[in-house]
Amino acid sequence: MTITSIISDSKPDLQPYEELYKELHQNPGLSLQEHFAAETAAKYLRELDGFEVRTNIGGTGLIGILKNGEGKTVLLRADIDALPVEELTGLPYASKKKEVDVEDGNEYSVMHACGHDMHITSMLAAAKTLHSSQKDWKGTLVILFQPNEERAGGAKAMIADGLYDPKKHACPIPDAVLGQHVMPLASGTVGTRVGSFASAADSFRVTVYGRGGHASQPHMTIDPVVLAAHIIVRLQTVVSREVNPREAAVVTVGSIISGRTENIISSEATLKINVRTVTPETRKAVLSAIKRIVKAECEASNSPKEPLWEPTSSFPFTINDEEVTNTVAAAFAKHFGDQHDSESPPLGGSEDFSILATEAPNKNGGKGVPYTYWNFGGVDPKKYKDALEKGTMSDIPINHSAYFAPVIQPTLSTGVDALVVAALAFLT
Amino acid sequence: MTITSIISDSKPDLQPYEELYKELHQNPGLSLQEHFAAETAAKYLRELDGFEVRTNIGGTGLIGILKNGEGKTVLLRADIDALPVEELTGLPYASKKKEVDVEDGNEYSVMHACGHDMHITSMLAAAKTLHSSQKDWKGTLVILFQPNEERAGGAKAMIADGLYDPKKHACPIPDAVLGQHVMPLASGTVGTRVGSFASAADSFRVTVYGRGGHASQPHMTIDPVVLAAHIIVRLQTVVSREVNPREAAVVTVGSIISGRTENIISSEATLKINVRTVTPETRKAVLSAIKRIVKAECEASNSPKEPLWEPTSSFPFTINDEEVTNTVAAAFAKHFGDQHDSESPPLGGSEDFSILATEAPNKNGGKGVPYTYWNFGGVDPKKYKDALEKGTMSDIPINHSAYFAPVIQPTLSTGVDALVVAALAFLT
Amino acid sequence: MTITSIISDSKPDLQPYEELYKELHQNPGLSLQEHFAAETAAKYLRELDGFEVRTNIGGTGLIGILKNGEGKTVLLRADIDALPVEELTGLPYASKKKEVDVEDGNEYSVMHACGHDMHITSMLAAAKTLHSSQKDWKGTLVILFQPNEERAGGAKAMIADGLYDPKKHACPIPDAVLGQHVMPLASGTVGTRVGSFASAADSFRVTVYGRGGHASQPHMTIDPVVLAAHIIVRLQTVVSREVNPREAAVVTVGSIISGRTENIISSEATLKINVRTVTPETRKAVLSAIKRIVKAECEASNSPKEPLWEPTSSFPFTINDEEVTNTVAAAFAKHFGDQHDSESPPLGGSEDFSILATEAPNKNGGKGVPYTYWNFGGVDPKKYKDALEKGTMSDIPINHSAYFAPVIQPTLSTGVDALVVAALAFLT
Amino acid sequence: MTITSIISDSKPDLQPYEELYKELHQNPGLSLQEHFAAETAAKYLRELDGFEVRTNIGGTGLIGILKNGEGKTVLLRADIDALPVEELTGLPYASKKKEVDVEDGNEYSVMHACGHDMHITSMLAAAKTLHSSQKDWKGTLVILFQPNEERAGGAKAMIADGLYDPKKHACPIPDAVLGQHVMPLASGTVGTRVGSFASAADSFRVTVYGRGGHASQPHMTIDPVVLAAHIIVRLQTVVSREVNPREAAVVTVGSIISGRTENIISSEATLKINVRTVTPETRKAVLSAIKRIVKAECEASNSPKEPLWEPTSSFPFTINDEEVTNTVAAAFAKHFGDQHDSESPPLGGSEDFSILATEAPNKNGGKGVPYTYWNFGGVDPKKYKDALEKGTMSDIPINHSAYFAPVIQPTLSTGVDALVVAALAFLT
């Protein structure tokens, strides 16, 4: 029996899942506050006989385990947190949620601007499909919902809380760890790739110091706004002059805050910096260049105090295992035909997904099991084609945009199929 | 009878006023929220028989009028608002006040970081002195407490509310409008100057627009942080290259805010800009250069939208009248001897004080009566001398600093005397 | 008979060619002034019976044609010009040449800093080898020496002068156009690659205008030095923010000249900009961004005059033909074994080589015959290995450096073999 | 007899001097190469009986001494060098001179763009007038022609060469040193001022170091063009943020040169910086800030080598003596009436004139005799008035501009009178 036939037999009506998607979309939870998503996921899994559900792993993380005879163990992972973005999609089911961030105490508008709600919904319908088709496969299935992906903390926290520890949450050790992300590609398509699939991402907060005073007396002060501006400008040279043009790297200053009012020169400025690299050598060189530049610009301003560096998150490299990826790709090719691209461009962003694999104990007594991560499209296929032809791709909202909104179908259906096909590639 | 003798006879014991100063210092009110100061001032004036007190003029503004026979009319003005600064003086009477700003809805630490508490206290003791010495002078005395000086709104608001309107608050038209400011000069000294004494100050908030997105995909975005940084850097050339080196001008970006988190590129940035100039030609040229630069930098970034300009405050030029200033200076010379400097350097900052004079109706059926504004020192004289000698003047906290704290004496006594001497220069 | 055996039989003693290399190295000619190189090449070719030599094609360009029976036609190309660089290698045969550039009239030190002397010498020894082995192959061989590669003018000039025109220089139409470049890779190795092998390069001179005046009176002037500096700084954002991080692009301001003396503000500044891109879309976007930024910065400075754009050179993309490249690669694999890398990294620089192929008339009545371009190493293999291991690759001088100096052997021998092997891959 | 009558009696017909002016204008000499001017001046002085002429003092410097009985000694000074500016005035007598600079070996167009030709001509006609009127005054007159003012070397060189040394050139010690400069003010007017009349000017050449390479390989290089641009941009903050807004200071980067061609990244950049200040404290602070910034920016770029600082010139402060200035001003008031302004704005530029006074031995065995320096206008009075009224003063060419061209009359006549009046103020 082919995987496609299994899906055809066992996949539930997706109409209720579309409603679930909208409900999740309207109830986003910031990183570390994904209570609604976690409770919803647990409830759905518990409704499926045979799933053993374990919750509160590394915060709101949870797993459902379905043991279905001898065979391989596959772990499917979905991330569940939302972002501090004010939704501007104008959709009837747009989020109006506001939430106080547990980390900084400020209130934010919250939005599933990265599509994790689509990940959760796809995963729940995939779990249902695999549950209904147990006669057609053998092995162990682990469904994992991971919190706090956006701040690169969730995977680490689940590991640290004993996800695989036989004495704690005792998650079965997977033979393959699988995950997916909805992207601004044509809905209905999926993309795989062997090797580097996502960059490492290092984030930190840097506070630089001036000396405050009256806006009319700059010579009595050291102006942190001017200092910060020169740092931002100078940092552009890291990518433009110090990185091999044939290699990808990004240095983004996502946030700059200094001063409150126009007639007072403040005494400090805070920059939030995000760095993306695809090789360890470049990562090291870029981080070192950033430190060198910040330090030197502080000296140029005669800053009275060393800058303060506070790392805020660190995403690993995502490098898809050749064998596991090829297995998934072959199954995708059969099921999706030419809607599958085995040379998909890497993700723009970064992921902490790989930690769930690289930190898993393996049979050699060491750490690390193979993994692959793929993407699936969320853009209306006609719109996507038009944009390609007209050269207006930049008008299509990307992840983290206030306008990011996958079309529900065929996105959801594709996301469900992809999870099921990939799991069954190992379990049949 | 000399003015010095009058003061010697009528000046009250300042001990209770020192306590009042501390109480005011611990109860600062942000601009537009100076309720405690206004109520205190009104209470004190009402305790002095003969003062007619009119309150709630242009907000919390108030005047006390003392008619004492035929003669000139003199208006003495004190400003009463505090600043959103967190006090770091460590003084026993340091402010711990927090207040929600009525303008932006945020909560701030509040501090009398510009010495207006000293202005209020000096004024109340001066009112008491002049009240006690009525037998020694003739004319009309107006004591005016003005709110919202820091945001350049109070003087305008009092005028707009009919300060001089016979049918509204009917303040007697002054022959001279007088005011003073405590500065980081040696306590015990006073300084006058004919002509330009304070710069004009124009403030505005500028919002510039980018296109938001994911930190890893800069090419899909227009980065407002990079745009804002280039604006700040470029604005430095206005003063360095476009203003006559022999003329004073300041362009300060007091605040820059863009983005919240490191992994999202924001869609806009907000700059708060403050401009100081001393001549109308330069004012015009500098404001025009700023607009030109902001516009061009938006174009350099391919910004999708025109920048938004929002004026936030506008202080006039302060140009001391020659005759009135010389009258005050002559009286100061007699009373203060070599503690008086008739060639005092201009204020660093700006003032809306002059509006109370330039908007007053005059005898010609037009507007504008003469005024003068002077300063008095607040720094311990020994510390001041040491700093001068050691070249460490930059260690002395200036107005608006979190460390700004006049020594109570002889600052208070000098402030009282200066007001009384200046008033009596016209009334005796 | 294998190609390797043919070489073994017919390759001349390279000792005299090593001397020739040194002689060429000491007599470099700037672009458009390659007289010594061209005369030397013509003399050597003429000494080989059967070669028909045609000179003065598009300046100092020349070809030698050897017809050797029925078969394919192969064109081997070497470039021959040197650079305005003052040699710092300290070699006994270092160049001390100075030459007045015919283009700008200035005198420069001249150096073969890009290894074209090695290209010429390899080509002459390869011509000798192929000449000696005529019994072992069939077809037509064209040896082409091209001037003015560095300024992207030579290939265009040879075409424009009628290289392939039957009524002008009547070069036989090649079935494959072949060329090579010595690079800072291990000497003894060769590298091929299908597809994009060198970026396009667009160069232009931009003059921006200010208003001159006295250094003490900046406000009476528009400072072109400050304008140019802001342009250079702002241009960094093109690569750092506007180009897809996964794609290669370079924007280099190679030269900035403004003003002569410190006490005069000049009235203009001249920037020389070089742009490298690997796709037509990025090329268009980058060139457009540069123009946008220069224009906007001129506006920010209130420049009195539109900037002047003068294109100075334009290198095409170099995209190696799949079939021709694979043919050469297969022959290299046999001859060079593991010293051949079929996934060689692309060149850092750009080439006008491809024009000799894309502008050749083809059998369909259109233009364009297939081509491939490869590299060969010039760094002492032991030094190269050490640098790799110690992470000191950046100490190895690259092309255009004043320290660039291939080791003569085995570089020369490898360059000769590569040309012969590649030609015979089509002719045997 | 009034000074005005003396002039009226003794002043020569200026027609031949107008021709002389044009001849000088067409034969400008760069600093250190003022041969034509010096020879012309010597020839004219020698034609006046009684003048003792001493030449070749500190290069092309010279003096003429006229002893005319007991009395004071007055030294009148004119500077004589021209500038490397290409004249664009379009005047019939415009300079077409080109000259190889002895300092840098480059050829420049040369122009009297600072009006020193007018200084020379005025001085020669003044010498003639004073020579003709010897019966009307008593004392010693020294006429001094000083070379190399533009590079601040001439006054120092004349002193160093023993100008006042009794054993060398034995110039009589002056009671007053007097000089003048033609400025873009209304022709016919003269301006004096007690106190600070010209800023100090410090110039230096700074070379900063990168690492050269190919334009396509920025990551293998350290780009000196980008480094230099960031230095220039950062230096703007010295004036905009570090200097008291009420005080004058200028930091001009008059020249930036790096790289020759677009496709090579150079290994160094050279900046020529000029600094103007009016107080010793600010001078020290500004020079120190510049060094701090250059050093820090080199560190930000990871520059391999400390920057090289080479002082090129240093102009002193020019501070007009109160008594001498008042003497001259009183005489000017009588002769010029309301064409004299005793509160003239200071010069924009700097002067080494004062060294001729501050380095002269005085009666107390120390150094320093009093001096005053004044200006006279060179702009057609009607044009000047129009420009003032229309606000188009910035269209009037200033000193060092390629368009600078005083109207010959009444400029020359005023320059002659001013020198004669000032001298006679001490000698009658």
Image (tube, coloured by chain):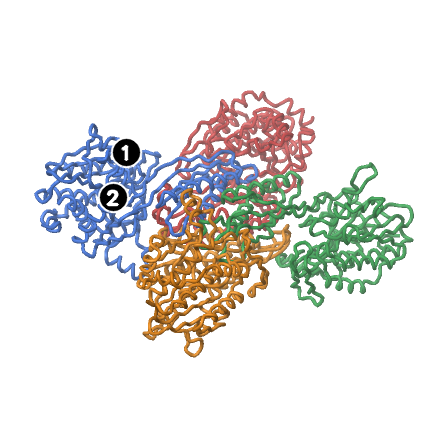
Chain colours: A red, B blue, C green, D orange
> Which quadrant would residue D392 be assigned to in this image?
top left
Q: Which mark sits nearer the N-terminus, 2 or 1?
A: 2
> Which quadrant would residue D97 be assigned to in this image?
bottom right
> In the image, residue C218 lies at what x, y percent?
45, 51
- Residue at label 1? B157
For label 1, the SS is helix
Q: Chain of mark 1?
A: B
In the depicted view, which residue is nearer to us: C212 or C362?
C212
In the depicted view, which residue is nearer to us: B125 or D249?
D249
Q: How many marks?
A: 2
Residue A304 seen in this snapshot: no
Q: Chain of mark 2?
A: B
Residue found at x 82% / y 37%: C365
For marks 2 and 1, give the one nearer the viewer.
Answer: 1
For label 2, the SS is helix
> Which quadrant would residue D174 be assigned to in this image?
bottom left
Mark 1 closeness class: few <14, some 14–19, many ≥20 residues within 10 Å: some
The reply, left or right, for residue D69 in relation to residue B52 is right
- Res. B194 mark: none
- Residue at label 2? B116
